[in-house]
Image (cartoon, grey):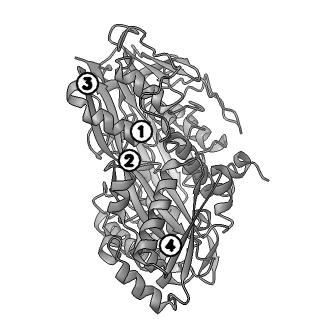
Amino acid sequence: MTSLVSWFENRQRPWADRQWRRVAQFVGLFGLCFAIAIGCAGNDQPVAEDGAGAAGDGRITIGTTLTARTLDPADAYETFPGILLYNLGDRLYTYEPGTTDLVPQLATELPTVSDDGLTYTIPLREDVTLHDGTPFNAEVMAFSIQRFMENGGRPAYLLSDKIATAEATGEHELTLTLKSPFAAFPALLSFSGVTPVSPESYEIGTGSFKPDQFVGTGPYKLAAFTSDSIKLDINEDYWGDAPANDGIDIQIFTSPANLYNTFRTGGLDVAYQTLDPEQVAALEREESSGGWQVIEAGTNVINYMALNQKIEPLNDVKVRQAIAAMVDRPLLNDRVFQGQAEPLYSLIPASFDIAEPVFKEAYGDGDFAKAETLLTEAGFSEANPLTVEVWYPSASTTRSIVANTLKESIEAGLPGLVTVNVQNTEGATLWENVGKGIYPIILANWYPDYYDPDTFIQPFLSCETGSNNLCEEGPSQANGSFYYSPKANELVAQQQAEQDPATRQQLIADLQQMMVDDVPYIPLWQNKDYVFAQDGVEGVAVEPTQQFLLWQISRG
């Protein structure tokens, strides 16, 4: 069998790299262990042996179960490294804290765009120095972007698919020429890995990565990086506002139970990612008496079903529509997540104003009368019942409960008419075979690379090669639906190129309507995000763009 890494590193098929991102994120965030009792003792030793903050005056201690494979911005493509890079480095553009307003950071203003939408001219700051003393200028930024594209890391295609050339056209002027117009390009430049690195410490070359160091421009310098702890020290020469703390000490825990217990007993200032629903509920119940704060936020992570149109009877749109009508999202939220999620009615998260609840309007929740009507029109009856097969990664307790809750609900709502068979396999095997069309229906999740609706449209609805209403090669094939629509391809390309916001919004609305009419996917739920902080710790928040700004945290 082809190895997972080699399959996902196929540079000729960038959509396959997004599947790797799903695996990496799934392992990091959804390996929840419901079987671990809340009171279970752990072996992890807290960073602050004498209680929160004991690691140093003004330093903040943070615990997590997430891991960091690498801190090389040209290769990092997981949640936790992205958070670290966002705090260790700067980008050309970022978001005003607490908002989704894109603002200049290392750039001094938003780019000037040529009439054909291909050339972006970006003026840069002149007062920035990298961690090793190297002055920041357009040559450094062009080098860093070129390295990101050429070194062949997991996120390389994000830029290499879009950028034709990156040039320093002045000491502090960067010019980026695109291969085709892309309206979301400034948002893409806010991706955590698009951060300058020192040409004195890094080189351009396929596979040339430095996973355990970072030399950039941000408010922190990397002081220590091991498999179980990470230390960030203040960058005394930072060009911007100084952090509100004296540094960050991060401990990586081996289980949610160990993280839970250490935080609950005061061994950490902050706990972030990932506790299981029972532990989250317990910390919420005890917030007023426990001496801690519960900070709740939405996320841009979507969870959905992909319906494989290569396999009968899912090639019949009425069957796909019937399955959409069978799904009861509020039931899932209540039984599986204890209210710690939100029902999702479009592949575009509700955090975007442009999102429309098209599936709720068209199919409702658990509308078994509508489902029965559609199945009857498709030729099914109790004498000729429908059998559907739902697959999920075996390590995901969450998806196991979701799949079995759906099975119970659907079979109770349509007795004798529908049978749901729940199947699972190891995650790497599942994602490796999705694009081969083996599984009828899969339960999956999706993490955006940057804050724009395109990241929830193009990877799902576009197809590079297709015929007979099936995608043969391209993103929808890699995502397991095999959806192929020349009209969808046309609309995707139009919304990517469209610079007028109102026109683009209408194009995206049309695409959402195509999603609900054709049902290649069924949106299920959005996760909520939780951070826990001891009383007296201030500035803890998850940004609307899902970033976690460590420099804002302080001890009051």
Q: Which amino acid, by three-letter code, is at mark 1?
A: Leu
Residue ID at (63%, 77%) = 311
Task: Using the numbered discs, state the Cα–Cα distance from disc 4 to disc 1 in whole angstroms.
Answer: 36 Å
**Circle 3 Cα neighbour tier, 10 Å, few/some/many (<14 / 14–19 / ≥20):** some
Task: Using the numbered discs, state the Cα–Cα distance from disc 4 to disc 2 in whole angstroms.
Answer: 36 Å
Give above or below for 335 relative to 148: below
Instruction: Name the element at disc 2.
Output: loop
Give above or below for 398 relative to 386: above
Residue 251 is situated, as x and y percent measured from the top left of the image, at 48, 22
Q: Earlier in the sequence, mark 4 or mark 1?
A: 1
Task: Using the numbered discs, state the Cα–Cα distance from disc 3 to disc 4 in whole angstroms.
Answer: 46 Å
Q: Which residue is mark 3?
A: 290
Res 92 label: 1
Q: Earlier in the sequence, mark 4 or mark 2?
A: 2
Res 111 label: 2
Task: Using the numbered discs, state the Cα–Cα distance from disc 1 to disc 3 in whole angstroms.
Answer: 41 Å
Residues at badges 1 and 2 in contact (C-beta under 8 Å)?
A: no
Give above or below for 106 relative to 306: above
Q: Earlier in the sequence, mark 3 or mark 2?
A: 2
Residue 169 is situated, as x and y percent measured from the top left of the image, at 50, 40
Q: Is residue 241 visible?
A: yes
Image quarter in which the C terminus is found: top left
Instruction: Name the element at disc 4.
Output: loop
Q: Is residue 144 left or right of residue 170?
A: right
Q: Earlier in the sequence, mark 1 or mark 2?
A: 1
Residue ID at (48%, 45%) = 175
Instruction: Name the element at disc 3.
Output: helix
